[in-house]
Structures are given as structure tokens and as C-alpha cells.
Image: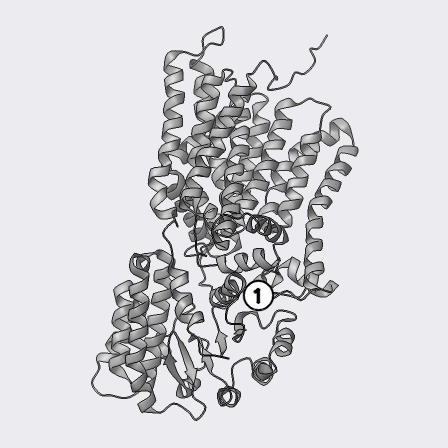
Amino acid sequence: MMRPEMALVPRGERDPNVRLVALALASGVPLAAFLATASVHDYWLDGGEFTAQAIDLDIAHPPGHPLAGLVGKLFTLIPIGPLPLRVALGQAVCAAAAAGFLFRAIETTLRALGVERDRLVIPVALGGTWLVATSYGWWFQAVRPEVYALEALLVCIAIERVIALEAAWPTLDVRPLYTAFLALGLGLANHHFIAFLVFPALAPTLARVYRARGARPLFGSALALVIGLSAYVYLPVRAGTEPPMNLGDPTNAANFFWVVSARVYAQGSGFDAPQPMSERFADVLVILVENLHGVVLVMALVGLYALLRTAGARRIGVVWLLVLVVNLAARAWLKSVRNNPDVLGYMMPGFAAAGALATALIGAVLARVGQRADGTPRFTATLLALVVAALGLAQMKSSVERASLARFHATDDFDEERIRRLPPDAVVVVHDPQSAFRHWAVEAIENVRPDVTVVPMPFLGYPGVVDALAERDPDVAELLRGQLLEGELRQPDLQSLAARRPLLVEMDVRVPRALYETLVPSGLYYEVVDAGATDTDVRESDAPHRAVLARLYAHLGDDAREAETKNRLLWMHYLDALYYASAGAREAARHSLRQALAIQPESRELRALEGALEDEGEGPIDVTPFVVGEHGS
């Protein structure tokens, strides 16, 4: 007579109070670190956009991120600190909760390997959890307005529930599967690409449940998925009320599909530096090493081997393997990895899987030599478990300086010059998406400068954006029409509008160099001169422009050395140098170039332009050979 199959991890007698304290430590320690280092001001990148979305329940860039908007709005209602901080705290809470579910998944994995006692399981699981949660890759997503910490929470819920089901198998209770699919449905309504990558890890469990229980659990899982996806109803409902930021106007079926499918990214920006696939995979591995250490990756490989060699536990090993491989391979396949600020957010599930597999090695060792015949832990095993916890906690020291945004204020310093000091009734043409996000964020947070009209060039191709702009400010209708007809700004349209209102343009490599003759620096923008800019106008603009930059640097202080702020400054100085060189103001060009080289002294393009400026003679320089893609390469 065959013995009935037993659960891989029997429930047994476990002290619920001990597990509750352990769970509180798993989430609470990272949460304390996140709260202490969260950003009071919006960070760069998409921070301004997601703050604006949370405050006004706007429509963010594709795929719309409806769940992030709703969660962010919830946290803006908490009367603690400035609005950007409240939105950042929402991500901190999500990242800490994700750590809690990761802890539970690692704990179950260790017990599946045969580690029985809490005094061994809990310290090791805590160490693995803290290793991941306080790595720079996770920490940085938890201290600023974004979507990745929320996505990590939903993915970790799904993974933990599937691992719990595998550990309890065979069982009649398949409700963990429903919870997993509900979490993934919500994940699809937040960042669908990351959520989609988790489905392969669920496929073996789903097939096992179908063979044993039939199709009914599959229908239940599908229903849970649809319930999660229903968050997308937010998009057309809110878009119909004409929110301040409405990127894609998903009020009809065509626009809704355009937003949700995010097909705009398939077209590329035209500035993506091509990177061979082999280099992308290499860069992904480098990121893993930088965040978790090379030793951890070796441990993860051996831990995976231990799981796959352990009867029953190999099912859990397959889940972790698929999470790791699919997540990292897909991110390397998707786009260039190097200098992509979103890569770390995409890789959060991969970090979690690598950390879990590394702890599996410790679990395999403890299961074989760390317990006596009666199951009681040896002293050396207990000591090893405590060392693992301490090492996981030590990750905080190596990450805090890079991840902390507690003293960050650079975006506010730029906002002072770029938004609050603008002339009355100005029209501002911006080319960098971040510049548009900053305007929308300041408008949502401070309700200032309603007199200013922002023309966001990167989003004019989005459905509904041009119509909404022209309806709000008819003065820009002709400018927009010319842009749509010819694909670039037209000088007559610019000068015509500049004769009526202050018209400022954010300098960019996409600004046709033929337009330089009608532009002069004004603050951190360039002002359109309706009659054309003379050589005298160009020369006289240099001193006021330097004064504005000096004031900006004085306010930035140490933030001028922050990584993304340096990129902003470098790009600005580089464009100033191109403009002045093209206009023949060589001394002004040299000054801008010196500022750029102080930030990136090894740039070949900057050095080449420096050589051209030092050549004998005066007058304009053809800057075409020195133009690089957006934000350099």
C-alpha cells in the first residue's frame, strides 16, 4: 500500500508570536531606513510626473499607471510633511511590505530544505531579506515617487503565495493561487511588463493544480486576474474629466488601447545608443554584483543546485529560477542597459530571487550538518544563522550613501530658476520630458504660475495633447500646427508669438540650428527675439546667463555632485557651448565648455569641441560634428 503524499512543509507547531516579531523586523528595519532617507522634494526622472499624478489623479505616461496614481493619492491625504514626501512614503511602505512577503517566501524555502527550528530559519531568512531590501537597487525605489516599489510588492505577494502553495502541496486549498493572480492583475495595472515576466514562474504550479483539481481553479485565477486589471477603468473615467496632465487622453477605445499597450516605446526615442546583446547581459550581471556582491551570486547558483537536488523542494527552486532568469534576460533583451535609470526598478524581482537562492545554500548546509538527530540546532549552526542576519543587515552601510535622498533639493533649486522666476504670461517650449514633469509637479504642489503655458514637445504626438493645449491657450495653436506639419519648430511661428508674449525655448539638440539666430540665453532657457538676435544680443546675454548659473550652483551646494543632477548640469553646459560656438561667441563657448569638462573631463565630444574653439580665427563654428544624442552617450 502506497503512503499518501505529504505536504513538503507541514504546518507543525510554530510560535505565532515569534513569527510576528520576525515579520515585523523583516519589514520594519528596511522601513525605518526608507523613511529616514526619503526625498522631501521630487527627485529627477519621473518623480515630478508621479507626484502630479498622485495629487490631481492625472493620467501618467503609457501605460497610464492607474494603480500607482490611486495609491499615491491615498498617501497624499496623510497630513505628514510636503506632498512629494507623502508620495515617496507610499513607495517606502510598499517596498517594506514587499520585504515582508519576501521574508515569508524565503522562510518557506528554508523549511522546504529541511531546516526546522525557528532559531535557524528566522535569522537566515532575515539576513536574506535585508540583503535584498537594503541593496541600492531596492532602496532607491523606496525613497522617491515612482512605481517600482509598488510593483515589487505585488510581485512578491504573487511569488510568496505560489511558494506557499507548493510547500503545502498536495492540498485542497488553492486560494493562494487566487491571491497570486489578483496581485499580478494589480501589477499589470501598475507596470504590466514587470508583472508579465512573473507568469512563467507560475506556469508549472498552474499546470500542477489543473492536473490535480481540473479547470475550476484556473477559472478562479482568471477571475482574480480580471478583478486586478479592473483598475484600468480609472483611465477613461478620469480622462473624461480633463485632468491637468492627460497623456494619451484614453477617453475612447483607440486612445485607451494606445495608452495601455505602451506601443509608443516600441518606436524608440531616436536617442537610444545601440548596445550589443552580449553587453546588455554583461551589464545586467554587473548590476547584480554591484547590488548584491559576486559572492552572493555564486551562493545563489549553488543554492539553486541544492533546491533542485532536494525532493519536493525542487518545485520551489523552479519558481525562483524562473523569476530570476526571465526577469534578468527580459531586461537585457528589452533595451540598452547602460546608463538607463529604470533598469534597477525592472530588476527588483531578480534581486529578490538571487537573494532567496543565496539563502537556500545556507539552508542546505544547516539542514545537513546544523541539526542534531532530534532536530535541535547545534551551537555552531545557531551562530552561523546569526552571522547571516548580521551580514544582511550590514548591506545598509554600503547602500545608504548612494540611496539616501534625505538632503536632496536640486529639483527645487532648478524649479526656482526655471519656473518661479519666469516672466508673466510666458510660453515655455520644453524638449526634455523631465522639464515638463517639473512644471506639472510644481503646478500641482504649489498652484503657482497658472499664467505660464508649457508646450511639452516630447508629448505632442500623444493623442489629445495638442488639442488640449490649443483649447487652453489659443495663442500657441499656430506654433503647434507648424510643428505637426513640418516636424520641427518654424521660425516665423516662433517670432510671431514672441512679438505678443515672452517665449522661452529649452535648448536641445533637436532645436534646428537655423533657429539659433533668433534665440538668446535667458535664465536657464533661451528667449525668442521676435526681430532676430544680433551679435550684440548674444554677447550681452553672456554675463546675465553666467550670473544665473552662479546663483544656481550656490543654491545646489553639494547636490551639484549628485549623479542625476550632474547629468542635468553637464547637458546644459554642453548645449550652451554649442550655441555660443555656433553664434561665434567663442569666449562664452569656452567658458561653458570648461564647466562641462569639470563634470566630465574624459568626454571625446567635449575635447573635440575644445580643440575647435582653440583654433586660430574667430567667428561661428559648424557644431554639427560635435552634436551627440540626448544627455550624451
Number of dots carrying numbers:
1
Nearer to me, 325 or 218? 218
Front residue of this view, candidates 251 and 544: 544
Q: Position of residue 79 (x, y in %)?
A: 53, 48
Residue furthest to the front in view is 79
For image coordinates 55% across by 80% down, the residue present is 487
For the point 60% across and 46% down, the residue is: 195
Within the image, what quadrant is residue 207 found in? Answer: top right
Question: In the shown orientation, is residue 343 left or right of residue 174?
Answer: left
Q: Quadrant of the C terminus?
A: bottom left
Residue 355 higher or lower than 483, as above or below: above
Q: Residue at x 54, y 20 (%)?
A: 17
Residue that mark 1 sits on: 267
Residue sitting at the far top: 374
| Left or right of residue 486: residue 119 | left
Q: Let me know if residue 601 appears in the view.
A: no
Asked whether, in this view, residue 322 is left or right of residue 259, the answer is left
Residue 211 rendering spot, x and y as whole percentages: 74, 29
Q: Along the horizontal axis of the image, is 97 left or right of 204? A: left
- The quarter of the displayed image where residue 131 is located: top left
Mark 1 closeness class: few <14, some 14–19, many ≥20 residues within 10 Å: few
Task: Assign a secondary structure to mark 1.
Answer: helix
- Which quarter of the rendered picture does the N terminus lie within? top right
Say which quarter of the image contains residue 597: bottom left
Residue 132: x %, y % from top left: 45, 37
Three-letter amino acid code of the residue under disc 1: Gln
Above or below 377: residue 419: below
Color theme of the render: one colour
Q: x%, y% of residue 508?
A: 43, 74
Residue 410 can be seen, yes or no:
yes
